[in-house]
């Protein structure tokens, strides 16, 4: 069943009035149960979840925690709100068709909870094969590591960013307890034995080292069963790079790293810092990496990147790396969107990784991959009732080899967990993938998304929108043209306003820091090359004619739409307060972060 009209208002909690018998529902349906729960507890998502689960998956209540119940309650309310807003189906469905769509959407939630109950009960039974419900593993390219298809990213559970936390005594007990609980859930319960942190993630590696030591001492985890990865940015001074690498290993309390990645190989300068002569005799950052690898302190080397497609391919083709952490998602390749031949982005890189038998590791699936933990109403309406947006984002990557005509493959992706339950939905999805239940539904949703894009933008624009468009590193004005067009398309096609605004605001902020009296290089140095590389480029200027130089190669037929796109992005995502209310289909369907992550919270010390 196709949702051609997206949900169109902020999520109201259904009331007894709106839940009146305006439609003839089948008795004891999931819709009935959900409506009863929402009417009875209009001010408590947790109690909505209790009431719904008590009648559908009662065992789940004893196996979960409050933040998971908040997510269940929010999902229920959001699904019900689609009917109240009159946005289910094609707008001409009869009552039974409307009920079927809502019922099938609630069935996804019930199925997810049932899978998690099945897992927990299996964990508790003696003599059972406990691996059958754990996350499956795949060969990670030529590393030969058996990599779980979901991995644990560690940039959301540490207490703070920066270097303010000098030792673990400065960490709040509840934060460290939460971290240990996440590790137990990931490693012991779900078999997610890959753990990825970075020296740039504040006190993440320090807290992680202490937590892992605790689990080693209790016998719950063995070091040799883990795949531990850390990352350090390439730097102009290789001595500083060496010190950072030594610090992260010391903080993690490890003698070796299974995987080490050069963090943020984002610009030509970082490539030069890694492989060039940096003024320290013949030493550069790669010499340090090679030294650690020769000593057995690093087993496999890769790089992470937000860089342009051509730089990623250039780095892969050096033959020095075993794997790559990069962006590629159903909605685009983040900073590389619109880059590469015909704007195909990082799919070119993934095809090259497959050709060279390297590990392909996608990063930030739920955030940079479209903020699908807080999807727009339109996006969610386009994935339901087949899959929730987060499950679809995972399924699209796991099945990319079936969707791409060149069979590009993604081996795994990271999930940044801020609390134990953040892993649950992905583990349930991984089990559906193992059972072969996701591919057909993924194909249906892909077609629906393509249809929505074509209907909103026109087939000719979809096919040609990146012709003659250049990225910021080739721009006379450092303007990020490709991302501006991409984000415009995301909003128009799928209502992804909040995601696009967050991303475009980084370009706006770069412009605010830009000093026109300085050269581009001087400005990038002032902003900070390492930080700038993660979201490079400036927003376009109003009324600026870029067709005389930057965009001279753009076909005449596309110029008016590009002007419209730039004006649109500056109006809606330019950072100013809007008097005009955003369209309802752009609003968030729900928020799957129940509370702020630890790094975002305020603490009484500095």
Image (spheres, rainbow, N blue to C red):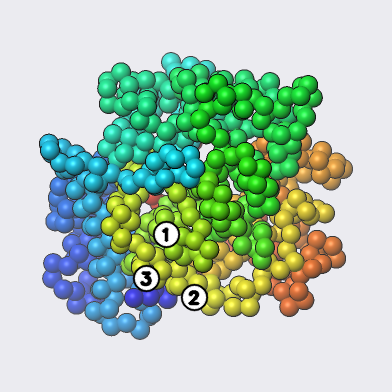
* In the image: residue 110, left or right of residue 362: left
* Label 2, label 1: how far apart the Cα atoms are: 20 Å
Give the quarter of the figure containing the N terminus. bottom left
* In the image: residue 473, left or right of residue 178: right
Location of residue 22 in the rendering, given as x and y in whole percent from the top left corner? 24, 76
* Label 2, label 3: how far apart the Cα atoms are: 22 Å
At a point 76% along the width and 74% down the height, the residue shown is: 555
In the depicted structure, whether residue 208 falls above or below residue 580: above
| Numbered tag placed on residue 399 in the rendering | 1
Location of residue 118 in the rendering, given as x and y in whole percent from the top left corner? 19, 48
Which quarter of the figure has residue 277? top right
Asked whether residue 273 appears in the rendered view, the answer is yes
Which type of secondary structure does the marked residue at label 3 adopt? loop
- Marked residue nearer the N-terminal end (2 or 1): 1
Marks 2/1 in contact by CB < 8 Å: the verdict is: no
| Numbered tag placed on residue 451 in the rendering | 2
Which quarter of the figure has residue 123? top left
In the depicted structure, whether residue 507 falls above or below residue 437: above
| Numbered tag placed on residue 240 in the rendering | none
Marks 1/3 in contact by CB < 8 Å: the verdict is: no
In this view, the residue in front, 302 or 446, is 302
| Numbered tag placed on residue 85 in the rendering | 3
Location of residue 151 in the rendering, given as x and y in whole percent from the top left corner? 41, 41
């Amino acid at each position: 069943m196709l949702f051609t009209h997206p949900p169109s208002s902020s999520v109201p909690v259904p009331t007894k009035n709106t839940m009146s018998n305006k439609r003839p529902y089948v008795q004891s349906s999931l819709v009935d149960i959900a409506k009863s729960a929402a009417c009875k507890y209009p001010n408590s998502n947790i109690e909505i979840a209790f009431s719904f689960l008590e009648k559908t998956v009662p065992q789940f209540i004893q196996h979960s925690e409050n933040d998971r119940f908040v997510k269940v309650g929010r999902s229920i309310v959001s699904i019900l709100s689609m009917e109240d807003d009159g946005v289910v189906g094609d707008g001409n469905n009869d009552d039974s068709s409307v009920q079927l769509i809502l019922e099938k959407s609630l069935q996804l939630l019930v199925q997810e909870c049932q899978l998690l109950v099945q897992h927990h009960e299996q964990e508790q039974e003696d003599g059972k094969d406990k691996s059958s419900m754990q996350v499956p593993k795949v060969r990670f390219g030529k590393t030969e590591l058996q990599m779980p298809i979901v991995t644990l990213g560690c940039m959301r559970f540490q207490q703070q960013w920066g270097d303010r936390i000098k030792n673990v005594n400065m960490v709040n007990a509840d934060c460290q307890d939460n971290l240990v609980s996440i590790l137990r859930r990931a490693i012991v319960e779900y078999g997610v034995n890959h753990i990825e942190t970075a020296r740039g993630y504040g006190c993440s590696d320090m807290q992680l080292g202490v937590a892992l030591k605790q689990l080693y001492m209790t016998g719950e985890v063995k070091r040799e069963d883990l795949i531990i990865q850390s990352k350090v940015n390439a730097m102009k001074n290789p001595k500083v790079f060496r010190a950072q690498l030594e610090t992260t290993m010391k903080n993690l309390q490890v003698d070796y790293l299974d995987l080490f990645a050069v963090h943020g190989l984002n610009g030509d300068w970082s490539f030069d810092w890694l492989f060039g002569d940096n003024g320290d005799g013949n030493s550069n950052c790669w010499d340090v990496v090679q030294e650690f690898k020769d000593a057995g302190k690093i087993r496999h080397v890769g790089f992470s990147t937000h860089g342009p497609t051509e730089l990623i391919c250039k780095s892969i083709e050096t033959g020095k790396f075993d794997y790559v952490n990069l962006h590629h998602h159903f909605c685009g390749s983040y900073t590389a969107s619109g880059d590469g031949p015909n704007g195909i982005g990082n799919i070119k890189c993934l095809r090259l990784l497959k050709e060279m038998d390297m590990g392909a590791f996608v990063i930030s699936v739920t955030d940079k991959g479209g903020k699908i933990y807080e999807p727009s109403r339109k996006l969610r309406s386009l994935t339901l009732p087949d899959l929730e947006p987060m499950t679809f984002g995972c399924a699209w990557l796991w099945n990319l080899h079936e969707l791409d005509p060149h069979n590009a493959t993604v081996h795994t992706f990271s999930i940044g967990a801020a609390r134990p339950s953040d892993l649950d939905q992905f583990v349930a999805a991984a089990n559906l993938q193992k059972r072969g239940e996701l591919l057909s539904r993924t194909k249906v949703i892909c077609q629906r998304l393509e249809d929505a894009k074509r209907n909103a933008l026109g087939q000719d624009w979809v096919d040609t929108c990146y012709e003659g468009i250049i990225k910021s590193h080739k721009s006379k004005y450092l303007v990020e043209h490709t991302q501006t067009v991409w984000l415009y398309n995301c909003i128009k096609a799928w209502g992804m306003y909040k995601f696009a605004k967050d991303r475009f605001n980084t370009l706006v902020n770069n412009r605010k820091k830009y000093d026109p009296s300085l050269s581009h290089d001087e400005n990038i140095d002032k902003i900070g090359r390492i930080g700038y590389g993660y979201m490079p480029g400036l927003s376009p200027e109003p009324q600026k004619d870029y067709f005389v130089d930057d965009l001279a190669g753009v076909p005449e037929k596309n110029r008016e739409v590009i002007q419209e796109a730039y004006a649109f992005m500056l109006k809606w995502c330019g950072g100013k307060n809007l008097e005009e209310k955003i369209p309802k289909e752009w609003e968030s369907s729900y928020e799957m972060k129940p509370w702020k992550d630890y790094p975002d919270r305020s603490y009484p010390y500095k």
